[in-house]
Image (tube, rainbow, N blue to C red):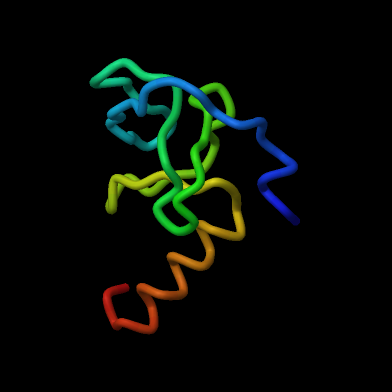
Amino acid sequence: MNHKDTFPPVMGKEAKVLFMDADFRVIQPGDFVRCAVTGQPIPLKDLRYWSVELQEAYIGPEAAMKRHLQRMTEGRE
């Protein structure tokens, strides 16, 4: 899946977000956050995947799984 096709280009300011178990809270207003794995912008309205422990966002389930597998290989989980 090509995530560039999934999300339109994002213009504006990057937000600062506190990731919680079932929700997130915007700490510093903005329009998007960046995926910790791909670096791609994720509009806040489309944000569905994140890690509470690492406080990072992911563009989709593939990116979230990639980060999880990286951490397992590093022996951190």
- Is residue 13 left or right of 1 when viewed as pictured? left
Where does the image place residue 50, in percent across and percent down from the top left? 43, 45
Q: What residue lies at 33% left-to-right and 35% top-to-bottom?
A: 19
Q: Nearer the viewer, residue 9 or 66?
A: 9
Vertical relation: 34 (above or below) 15: below
Q: Which image quarter: residue 29? A: top left
Q: Quadrant of residue 68?
A: bottom left
Residue at 55% over, 46% down: 59
| Front position in the image: 77 or 48 | 48
Q: Quadrant of residue 27?
A: top left
Identify whether 77 is placed above or below 4.
below
**Residue 33's spot in the image, x, y percent?**
41, 34
At 28% from the left edge and 53% from the top edge, which residue is drawn? 54
Q: Quadrant of the C terminus?
A: bottom left
- 60 left or right of 20 in image: right
Q: Residue at x 44, y 28 (%)?
A: 32
Instruction: Estimate the x, y position of residue 36 in percent, counting from the top left.
Output: 40, 53
Whether 22 is drawn above or below 67: the answer is above
Q: Quadrant of the N terminus?
A: bottom right
List x then y, in percent, for residue 74.
Answer: 31, 82
